[in-house]
Image (cartoon, coloured by chain):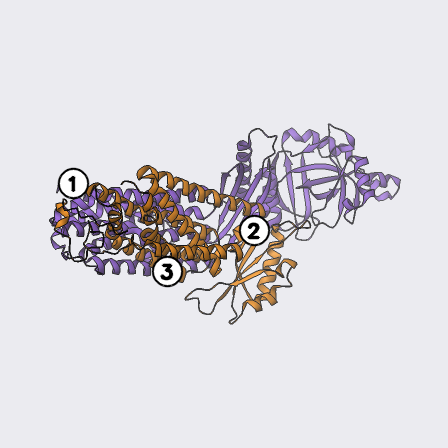
Chain colours: A purple, B orange
């Protein structure tokens, strides 16, 4: 039949395309049969890694929240790249009226570094430290009043051991405020004074060099004053430069010479990694909005491997059972369905490999569920063929009638599963979207297999179809 | 109920009518010939009892919610020492931090895991104001080390969900369920008679309530996978039901003038093999997901295993029999 030839050609073209997509070079290194799946991207829940989700707290006054989220995205991308996490994925997502940023770092083994890198707002400013306490002054009324009188605020030090009263306006001069400057260069440098510690040296953008020079001039304290121990020293104590990052005082110290070239250092007993991260944060600038952690997942690669093997067993045994059942129940028509199962699974995996869709654990559940329902179309078609033959039709006519009747039944019934899967894709968060993807793709692969591929095979073997005249299943 | 109508006009049918004619005088009589419509009240009663049990369990016992609904942090720890019980784990971790005292600790195990003992520890850390908080990066490192040294194992996952996120997921879940049900009702009402849409939705609610009820009754974790199962089940079960409706529509045209009850009963019978075959195959494959894997995915297997049985039951005994009284024409 001519139409069968067209069906056969389309079926084979799709099959070849799927296999090519699966075998195309560039996948994970794998051996034997594993090569077939090496191009399918695994979700973090299977490969292991870190997934962080933050809500972007966009200020209500801000007019364009989408562009704020875009800026957040760019800053985080830069930070992750410059800290060496080039394989990290940063995604924007919007749900209801909220904006979220998701960061996924495959193969990462701890969340700490990533969380520090992403969670830090990175807002850097320079201020004047006028006082300090070794206890939490925000609960002491005298200290709180002092802050109000001085128009300053208490900030804790990085390690929380001390608190500093810091003014943003240096010597109360409104023109001497330096907040969120652009930094052209920042890098970890071995501390010349300390032992095996690192400092972060930075260079301010040209636009900020002048104001930084004026600030350091204003706060300049000659070195001899520091050693004098007189009342001059008491005044000098109120003129220390404070470097504040993320509302934590990173550094407080005297300016012993005005800085004219916009170069400075942040010291704080950093390890090399800490210094490297801080440098990355300084280089990529401040986040334009605060991020609040909503979800954090750390998944060990070990867990993923275990689950993949467990699911492989589940899938193989499930498939074997379905195949045996179909063969036992429908004989040669069951064999057609069994070949169809393998065909549809190849299409499904080929699609995943070809489009770079991500396979998650719920995605595997979707595939295994699909295996159970794959042959539903064959069951409907086969039942109909049996009925038509019993009603006295020839096998060929029975097959034609069955397919023309079954199309809309299959269409109607599959559409409802697609509706449910789409709702899950739209409302689902995280890995659960993977379930929706495999389910929807699985349904399309199954429908194509049921209606096109199986038709060719059934027509080809129609001579061998035998149906008992009186129904098989009798009470 | 014993309305017997004989319609000999249908030539296609007369040839096939055989010994297994039902009390109605069947239009379809090959294969199954069971009286579903006549005995519908028995089957509806069984369902009603199951629904009542489910609702009682849901409202009194409640659910064993997963961390994505509760908010808080879940650590999954694999211990190397054998024979460790939940009580041992509790004793060993309770001093780590205040929130570990009332941690929810479960053993998670699957076939083929052998020596390994895996435990899930869910804690709900609070800040000074008693509001659920997430840990800072440093706190996490600290806790991981403490738990690993207390239990002599490895922390495989450390998942955190903030209170806001938990609330959001609850909202999204409701929206997803409502949108799905509405979309399916609209679709079925457009494609079939409205009254069948009602029957389909009753059947769906039947399946969803019983499935969710079993989650409560057996204390299976209610997590994102469980919700995926409930939504998929809704799509799957309606699929089953539609195949029957489709046959009712076809028989309705073919055997115009026949008793509606006969046509509906015969439609259920003629699709019965398909309903059972697909149901059995789906049931066994999703059952594998309950048996083999560890962790959250088992909830999907559980939900779907219950759901496929409930779905096949409602397709046969509930969806069309329950609305039969209001069906005026086909």
Please rate how many residues cluster around mark 3, counting C-alpha atoms within 10 Å: few if below 14, some from 14 to 19, many from 20.
many
Please state which of the two labelled residues, at mark 2 or mark 1, is closer to the viewer. Answer: 2
Q: Nearer the viewer, mark 3 or mark 1?
A: 3
Query: How far is mark 2 from mark 1, CA to CA?
Result: 57 Å
Mark 2 and mark 3 on one chain:
yes
Which of A262/B199 is in front?
Answer: B199
Q: Which residue is identified by label 2?
A: B71
Provide the secondary structure element on which disc 1 rests.
helix
Left or right of A180 on screen, residue B303: left
Of B3 and A41, the residue lying toward us? B3
In the rendered image, which residue does mark 1 sit on? A3
Residue A46, visible in the rendered structure? no
**Earlier-in-chain disc, 2 versus 3:** 2
- Residues at discs 2 and 3 in contact (Cβ within 8 Å): no
**Badge 3 vs badge 1, beta-carbon distance below 8 Å:** no
Q: Residue at left 71%, top 43%?
A: A249
Q: Which residue is mark 3?
A: B288
């Amino acid at each position: 039949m001519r139409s069968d030839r067209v069906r056969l050609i389309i079926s084979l073209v799709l099959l070849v395309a799927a296999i090519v997509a699966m075998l195309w070079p560039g996948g994970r290194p794998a051996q034997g049969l594993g090569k077939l799946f090496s191009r399918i991207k695994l979700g973090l829940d299977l490969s292991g890694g870190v997934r962080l989700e933050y809500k972007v707290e966009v200020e209500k006054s801000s007019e364009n929240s989408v562009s704020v989220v875009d800026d957040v995205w760019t800053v985080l991308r830069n930070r992750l790249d410059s800290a060496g996490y080039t394989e990290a994925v940063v995604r924007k997502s919007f749900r209801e009226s909220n904006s979220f940023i998701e960061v996924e770092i495959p193969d990462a083994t701890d969340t700490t570094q990533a969380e520090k890198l992403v969670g830090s707002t990175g807002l850097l400013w320079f201020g004047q430290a006028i006082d300090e306490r070794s206890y939490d002054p925000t609960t002491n009324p005298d200290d709180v009043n002092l802050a109000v009188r001085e128009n300053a605020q208490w900030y804790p030090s990085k390690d929380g051991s001390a608190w500093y009263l810091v003014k943003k306006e240096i010597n109360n001069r409104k023109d001497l405020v330096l907040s969120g400057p652009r930094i052209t260069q920042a890098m970890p440098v071995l501390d010349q004074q300390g032992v095996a510690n690192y400092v972060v040296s930075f260079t301010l953008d040209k636009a900020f060099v002048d104001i930084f020079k004026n600030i350091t001039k204003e706060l300049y304290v000659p070195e001899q004053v520091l050693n004098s121990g007189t009342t001059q020293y008491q005044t000098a104590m109120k003129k220390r430069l404070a470097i504040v990052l993320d509302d934590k005082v990173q550094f407080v110290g005297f300016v012993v010479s005005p800085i004219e070239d916009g170069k400075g250092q942040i010291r704080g007993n950093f390890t090399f990694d800490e210094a490297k991260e801080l440098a990355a944060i300084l280089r990529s600038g401040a986040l334009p909005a605060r991020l609040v952690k909503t979800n954090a997942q750390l998944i060990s690669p070990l867990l993923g491997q275990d689950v993949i093997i467990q699911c492989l067993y589940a899938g193989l045994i499930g498939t074997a059972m379905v195949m045996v059942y179909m063969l036992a129940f429908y004989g040669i028509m069951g064999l057609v369905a069994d070949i169809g199962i393998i065909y549809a699974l190849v299409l499904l995996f080929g699609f995943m490999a070809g489009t770079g869709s991500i396979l998650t654990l719920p995605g595997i559940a979707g595939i295994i569920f699909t295996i159970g329902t794959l042959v539903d179309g064959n069951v409907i078609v086969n039942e109909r063929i049996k009925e038509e033959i019993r009603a006295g039709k020839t096998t060929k006519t029975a097959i034609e009638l069955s397919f023309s009747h079954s199309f809309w039944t299959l269409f109607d019934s599959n559409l409802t599963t697609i509706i449910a899967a789409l709702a899950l894709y739209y409302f689902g968060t995280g890995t659960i979207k993977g379930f929706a993807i495999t389910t929807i793709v699985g349904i399309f692969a199954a429908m194509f297999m049921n209606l096109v591929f199986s038709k060719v095979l059934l027509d080809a073997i129609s001579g061998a179809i035998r149906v008992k005249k009186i129904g098989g299943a009798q009470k | 109920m014993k309305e017997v109508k004989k319609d000999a006009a249908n030539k296609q049918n007369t040839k096939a009518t055989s010994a297994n004619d039902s009390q109605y005088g069947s239009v379809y009589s090959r294969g199954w010939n069971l009286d579903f419509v006549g005995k519908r009240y028995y089957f509806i009663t069984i369902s009603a009892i199951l629904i009542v049990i489910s609702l009682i369990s849901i409202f009194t016992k409640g659910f064993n919610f997963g961390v994505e609904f509760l908010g808080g942090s879940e650590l999954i720890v694999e211990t190397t020492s054998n024979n460790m019980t939940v009580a041992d784990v509790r004793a060993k971790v309770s001093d780590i931090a205040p929130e570990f005292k009332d941690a929810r600790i479960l053993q998670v195990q699957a076939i083929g895991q052998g020596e390994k003992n895996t435990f899930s520890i869910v804690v709900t850390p609070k800040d000074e104001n008693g509001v659920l908080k997430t840990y800072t990066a440093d706190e996490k490192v600290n806790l991981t080390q403490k738990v690993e040294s207390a239990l002599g194992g490895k922390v495989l996952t450390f998942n955190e969900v903030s209170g806001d996120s938990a609330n959001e997921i609850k909202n999204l879940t409701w929206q997803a369920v409502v949108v799905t049900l509405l979309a399916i009702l609209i679709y079925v009402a457009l494609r079939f008679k409205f009254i069948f849409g009602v029957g389909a939705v009753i059947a769906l609610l039947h399946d969803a309530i019983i499935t969710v009820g079993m989650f409560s009754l057996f204390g299976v974790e209610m997590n994102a996978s469980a919700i995926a199962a409930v939504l998929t089940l809704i799509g799957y079960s309606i699929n089953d039901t539609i195949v029957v409706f489709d046959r009712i529509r076809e028989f309705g045209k073919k055997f115009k003038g026949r008793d509606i009850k006969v046509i509906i009963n015969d439609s259920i019978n003629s699709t019965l093999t398909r309903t059972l075959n697909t149901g059995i195959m789906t049931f066994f494959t999703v059952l594998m997901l309950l048996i083999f894997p560890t962790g959250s995915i088992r909830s999907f297997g559980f939900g779907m295993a219950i759901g496929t049985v409930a779905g096949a039951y409602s397709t046969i005994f509930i969806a069309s029999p329950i609305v039969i009284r209001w069906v005026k024409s086909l």
